[in-house]
Amino acid sequence: MTRSLPSAPLRPGASLPRAVFATLLACAAVGCATLEPPRPMPVLPPAYTHAETGPAARAGDRGLAWWRAGELPVLDTWINAALARNADLAMAGVRLRRAMLEARLAGTQLTPTVSGALNTSVARGLGSAQPDPGSSSTGQIAVSWELDLFGRLGALRDAAGFEAQASKQDRQAVRQVLVASVIDLYFQLAYANDRVAMAEASERDAQRIVALVQARFQAGAEGRLALHEALQVREERTADLAAQRQAAVVLRERVRVLLDGASVPQPEPRALPEVALPPVQPGLPAHLLGRRPDLRAAQWRLQAAGARTDAAAASYYPGIALTGALGSSSKALLDVLANPVATFGVGMTLPFLRARMLGIELDIARTRYEEAAIGFRKALYTALGEVEQALSARTRLAEQDVALRRAQLQAAEAARIYEARFRVGLLPLRSWLDAQERLRAAEVAHAATRLAQLQNRILLCQVLGDG
């Protein structure tokens, strides 16, 4: 991660003045700082604990586009709208452009700087007896160039370049999170609309039960208690339907925010799709470094911190600047360059005279590098933990899906039997209503687990750096 300070020999035949040579010896006597050796990479496990066994994944098997196999083309419309309008992605793009401009600006420090000036002045006497001083013009073109003999400017240029690369990965990470959020909201809205459909069917069942009980009550085959129970259940299910519709409205507004105010693309999903989830091959833990943009950004920033530390260490060495100017002055503006005068100079800074301050600045740079190294290790181990949790959840959710699917079938059969026995007078109404509630709970639990499976797949793609 750290960069070594370059040794740049002078051109053949060139020599330094004695004062410069003495300064270099003084700097060496003070003891120019050396960087610590780069730390080894964090130790990574050879494989994920909860990964499935099977052949290695191909490059085309990865990515959030797995849902396209389920014939959901409307998701492309959602994603394209979000990529075109989302404010967070736009801000990340602006930050990337700024970082690239800053890197270009840092690179210009290694090249000569040219400046010019042209001034004209006119003087007039205030008294009638005073002669008119006339006018004068001056012009100058100057060139300055700091020799980067010890790599300080190069290190600062590299640091800015590394930051630009980190900003590029930041934008990729924002894009990945945005795509995952769009797909997640799509499935959440599908689940919410599914819940609305369930609540509507449940309310219709309640209306049918009320009509049945009222007819039996008027015929004297049912008591007033059963009628009140049926009416109570109908009102409860009507309230639940209103709550489910409001939940769907909230999700639509979240989609509008994600799309920067645009309306929800149509057609809107009405139920969770029966998409067959393909197997996940997460690869090796070491692959995360090349696949997750947040980890790549942390790596680039660690390199930038190392480059700044190199620049701080190079500040111990003297800085040498070459300057040249070509200028003239004349009473006539057009003759200002008729008799140019050239000047040349060599400037040198003496940093060893402020060695104490430079030492503090170097220590500060080292602490920033240390902080970046710790942050990178933390991000890497956090990413490994996220993958392990998502892989484990995938297995557990598959087990829950099988069990809840069976429970739903059993609850449906039980509700059918309770209804048949109620109709012939073998069971009270409450038993049938309770059986219906258990069936509704089983349907909701199974749908929620199906949503959790789809969200887990989105999360897996995200934590593995796909998409």
Image (tube, grey):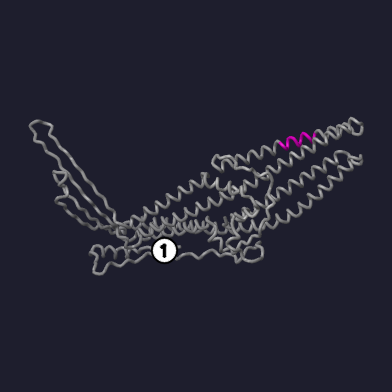
Q: Residues within 10 Å of mark 1 (few under 14, many from 20)?
A: some
The foreground one among 289 and 182 is 182
Q: Quadrant of the C terminus?
A: bottom right
**Element type at mark 1:** loop
Q: Name the spot of residue 180 as percent of width and height, x first.
A: 59, 50
Q: How many marks?
A: 1
Is residue 189 on the magenta stretch? Answer: no
Left or right placement of residue 19 versus residue 372 in this view: left
* Above/below status of 160 relative to 233: below
Residue at image location 80% in from the left, 38% down from the top = 205
Residue at image location 49% in from the left, 46% down from the top = 90
The foreground one among 458 and 379 is 458
Q: What range is drawn magenta here? A: 232-241
> Mark 1 = which residue?
3
Tag 1: amino acid = Arg
Left or right placement of residue 12 versus residue 417 in this view: left
Residue at image location 73% in from the left, 49% down from the top = 446
Single out the residue that lies furthest toward the left.
129
Is residue 240 on the magenta stretch? Answer: yes
Q: Name the spot of residue 279 as percent of width and height, x first.
A: 66, 60
The quarter of the picture where residue 257 lies is top right
